[in-house]
């Protein structure tokens, strides 16, 4: 019977042959596979498939970030926030292909051993073909790239939340090119690229520090250089600026949680049943515990159950467990989530007290809980050194924060990074885009 | 080349080895896998992966439920609904880990044979390690737990829809602890846990009864004990209280349908190609038929095509096919969906006639179509007994409804379960949370 | 230990046996699998699983289309748009099961060789059982059906966007029955069904022409026969009618991009690691490039970064790469995306200049970039003929456009296809459904 396969056989036949083998019985199957596809091992196929699916799950986290940030801010900045987040994804993916991947995984091309390396511009599966280059791996070169590329944009999306409502679009996107193209991959190379942190026994499974805290440091730098939104801190008092759509925020958090199964689960780097299922359980329990802890603490603090806090509690638990999802027991994962959920509420209050305006709580979630999660590995993980975890946290901070701070300051002195006060009142949608998020929205009657 | 793998090799090497083996040809592959990973069979890896992915798909159904319930109710209760649904997920997951899993699957630890058993608190993959404990299974202990845990919260989310807009938050969450931690797993143990219903030949593939009708009975009890929302039934007439966002409701239904592929497909409990693909087809056709049937019937009844009915028709078809997705032919699946789609419209009218106020149609979808789907197995399924199906339906009802009714009544007499009339007018968002769902929403101009 | 497996063992045991085998070591595993499941090859299981997962991903694209179309139009037509899109999915799936699948893949049942064939009504896995019928394939009969069925509805959803805000619901749904049940599968049979285009060396990997341009031709016919919305072109000037919810539009685009990994990745028709990962990379880079190109061009044209253009740029890149995602290098994929992103902005201006009113830019995205992507295969793909690509584009157009135009005209002369002007002012939600999308929406305070 003819199917698509037959139709596009010209090009694909060599690739498809193994897949099309279907055996009448086990013995024939093995024989047929061996004959038709020397080198195509089912274990390789399933491992590789999981990495690709994990990449897809991480991709949808970007929609999660967009919805969360848009939902927790006012409707007058919504177009701007959606645009920023879409552009960050595009920039992140392209920059990671252009240079980030080869900065983060320099292979043998270290220039300063374990500190800085660069394997050249662009993507190159190698002379032996895509697969051969990964003969020791569970997935192809391109699977590796796409999974890692989906991660990369995340660190800028975190920054985006903290600077929402007042940052100049163009300047921020230039910052993203720099941060995602240079800073994020260099810090990543120290650990995941096999650099000096990897040799010190630092353990950051899926990036509490390398992704979340690094993004958090950039966010802190951005929020500090920009200053708070007009009207947030008046006469020494905090005046909450409430979000414009809690359903949008909730969609954001659920999608982030959903995608986190790819973020953490894919970081196993294979479909190994024991580890992936274990990581799913610790990830889930930490998130659930974060929700309840943030709820309880926010009830104690503000007398009412606060939805934004409960939502951020889920993210806090997720960020917290990310460093040690593979080495922390389910019960300990609950503890990690409880602490993260409590921390996030305290941190929101703290940053408001020191007048660092963070519209979506990005610092509290990603920076504070990213650090907590990294240290938690030293506390709970067997054979893990709290000292090594501290070193990893400090080292990442020592590059991410000053680099981001200097770059934001440089932008401030040159292009400017903050919109005019008038434009801030008007909202960035009109000021920067000449568009409204809800222009055609009309409610005919209300009950 | 160094990659994450190398960096976290310390802990993971023993687990990763099999995954990292990539063979130059088939024969070497088999040899290498056997040498490096005694016990890691590719069939096990792919089966386990599917169960984990199915769990992720079921997870996102909780966002679907949240969006549907929020969309079909007024904006003044939106924060409350989102909060409730998030908290239910957190409570459901943690309670299932604490005791639900071991109540539902007591193994040898039956106290009353086939009726009640409990294998102890907490999670325990057993002395032989996670995998060995499941040597006869297609997935690990933790995969089993996470897939089942994602199901558990569902039964409370169903209740949530029926009590929306008037229930006290705290009391409802206490009910959830009880219902998801005790009632749902006990009923589940009768069939899926290998208890007395399993021995009677009852067939409920993925839970038309065990999940949906059980949740539906809880919803009926809640709606009855609470009474209708103020203004719903005035002078013997039904005054529809319309939803505040049909896009949100539509997002909810599409996400539920999306997640149902994990709900039903994962219930195959392996990635067996024949069964999973068959289940996908029956599930899809029943949903599609439900949409069209509910549309046609609602046009006959109300002269216009009603979007809420069409949306609920999709869910009706899905709930209806859930019990027999594995034993009902594609053509019969269409019939199951058509009947379910028609039933849901009739049931909505019926519950309004008897003045049971169900804001989102949870009773019509989950209870009525859950029962229909269970009986449909007896009608269409080869070798299935309609009698056994009736027994399963009645037995579940006999525990779920009275238990929920009594517990809600107990809460009513003690903590109270209904908010003050004033708070109901104001909306639960302000009354219970001091927050608005759309506080920062401002439309500048309308066309 | 008893689990669901045990409970439903009666029916499923024969299917589950292979899945339940878990071996103590590699050698035993292979032996056990061979003994228990003659014919169940792990490669088959993983390939089949990927096709099913791809189908799930394509399914959620329908939510993406719904959100995008609803978001980019006014709130008074939202119920209508959501209803239309839900009904299209239901109709598409059922029609594809009834006749579409067997028209598109006639097998040996060609009536006019390579031009028209029909293998009969309904689904039939064949006398040898589902699996045996596909002994030469990587997936089961039902997996093939469900993956292809998810595609089918897409071509009508594309039309839906172009006729939004003025089309009569009933007439449009009749058009869908015709277009998805007859036109789409016949054109598909020419290439994917092994017909005459396949023999000419035409290459359309996942449907830039067969899905997107075919839908686009239907959309053009619909927009032409209907005429523009009242108020769009006044005194020779274009008066933009802005969307009512950019978050909804953004959710739509992100979900479409997300689902596209199944659309393109699943079109590999196996989980072959090399090809699927390659397709993921080209798909991703083209989308990212489309975003940036559309942004830059829209800034040049309108002086401000336009969010709708950036969103449509992502889709443009995705549509553009769809024909050649398997044969175009990553760098060339960026070029394809850049051109598509630029084209989409120009095309939107062009269609407005010629007064063809396309509320969501469906023509610019799906028709224009579908053609571009198909031709790009001739330009960039090794061993691909630009001539053959032209023939494919023209042939599809030669059936899709006249057929759609005639059918829309026929409907116009009989049932009518356009609502009364009064109803258009009022909005289709009230006029056709008697429902509002945001009836219960009330904002209490704004900041």
Image (cartoon, coloured by chain):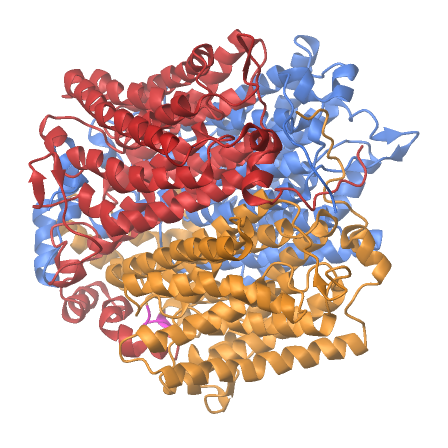
Chain colours: A red, B blue, C orange
Q: Is residue C134 magenta?
A: yes
Residue B417 appears left or right of C246: right
* B192 w.r.t. C217: above or below: above
Which quadrant of the rendered structure holds the C terminus of chain A?
top right
Residue A150 appears left or right of C341: left
* C285 w.r.t. A73: above or below: below
User: Which residue is farthest bottom?
Assistant: C112
Q: Is residue A194 visible?
A: no
Q: Looking at this view, is A287 or B296 the one in front? A: A287
Q: Is residue A125 magenta?
A: no
In percent of the image, x 28 and y 60: which residue is there?
Answer: C278
Q: Is residue B5 visible?
A: yes
Q: Looking at this view, is C73 or C16 the one in front? A: C73
Residue C256 appears left or right of A37: right
The magenta span reads: C132-137
Q: Position of residue C63 (x, y in %)?
A: 56, 52
Q: Position of residue C255 (x, y in %)?
A: 49, 50
* C62 w.r.t. B101: above or below: below
Q: Looking at this view, is B93 or C128 the one in front? A: B93
Q: Main secondary structure of the magenta part?
A: loop
In percent of the image, x 71 and y 17: which residue is there?
Answer: B418
User: Which residue is farthest front?
Assistant: A414
Q: Position of residue C346 (x, y in %)?
A: 53, 65
Q: Position of residue A215 (x, y in %)?
A: 33, 30
User: Which residue is farthest right?
Assistant: B235
Which quadrant of the rendered structure holds the N terminus of chain A?
bottom left
């Amino acid at each position: 019977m003819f199917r698509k396969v037959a139709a596009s056989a010209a090009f694909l036949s060599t690739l498809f042959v193994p897949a099309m083998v279907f055996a009448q019985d086990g013995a024939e199957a093995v024989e047929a596979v061996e004959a038709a596809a020397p080198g195509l091992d089912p274990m390789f196929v399933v491992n590789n498939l999981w990495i690709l699916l994990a990449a897809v799950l991480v991709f949808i986290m970007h929609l999660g970030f967009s919805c969360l940030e848009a939902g927790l801010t006012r409707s007058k900045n919504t177009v701007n926030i959606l645009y920023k987040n879409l552009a960050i994804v595009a920039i992140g993916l392209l920059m990671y292909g252009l240079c980030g991947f080869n900065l983060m995984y320099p292979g043998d091309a270290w220039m300063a051993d374990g500190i800085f390396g660069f394997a050249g511009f662009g993507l190159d599966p190698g002379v032996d073909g895509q697969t051969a280059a990964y003969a020791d791996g569970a997935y192809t070169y391109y699977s590796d790239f796409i999974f890692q590329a989906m991660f990369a944009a995340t660190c800028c999306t975190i920054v985006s939340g903290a600077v929402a409502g007042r940052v100049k679009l163009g300047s921020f996107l230039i910052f993203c090119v720099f941060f995602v193209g240079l800073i994020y991959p260099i810090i990543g190379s120290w650990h995941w690229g096999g650099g000096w942190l990897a040799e010190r026994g630092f353990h950051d499974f899926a990036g509490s520090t390398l992704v979340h805290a690094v993004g958090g440091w950039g966010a802190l730098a951005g929020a500090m250089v920009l200053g708070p939104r007009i009207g947030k801190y008046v006469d020494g008092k905090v005046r909450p600026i409430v979000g414009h759509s809690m359903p949008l925020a909730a969609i954001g958090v659920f999608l982030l949680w959903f995608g986190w199964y790819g973020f953490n689960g894919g970081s196993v780097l294979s479909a190994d049943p024991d580890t992936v299922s274990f990581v799913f359980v610790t990830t889930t329990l930490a998130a659930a515990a974060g929700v309840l802890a943030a709820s309880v603490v926010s009830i104690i603090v503000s007398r009412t159950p606060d939805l934004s806090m409960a939502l951020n509690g889920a993210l806090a638990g997720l960020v917290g467990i990310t460093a040690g999802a593979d080495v922390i027991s389910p019960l300990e994962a609950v503890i990690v989530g409880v602490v993260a959920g409590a921390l996030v509420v305290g941190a929101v209050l703290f940053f408001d007290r020191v007048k660092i305006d963070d519209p979506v709580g990005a610092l509290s979630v990603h920076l504070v809980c990213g650090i907590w999660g990294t240290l938690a590995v030293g506390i709970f993980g067997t054979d893990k050194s709290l000292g090594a975890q501290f070193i990893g946290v400090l080292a990442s901070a020592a590059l991410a924060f000053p680099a981001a701070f200097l770059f934001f300051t440089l932008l401030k002195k040159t292009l400017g990074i903050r919109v005019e006060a008038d434009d801030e009142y008007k909202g960035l949608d009109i000021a920067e885009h000449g568009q409204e998020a809800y222009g055609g929205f009309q409610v005919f009657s209300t009950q």
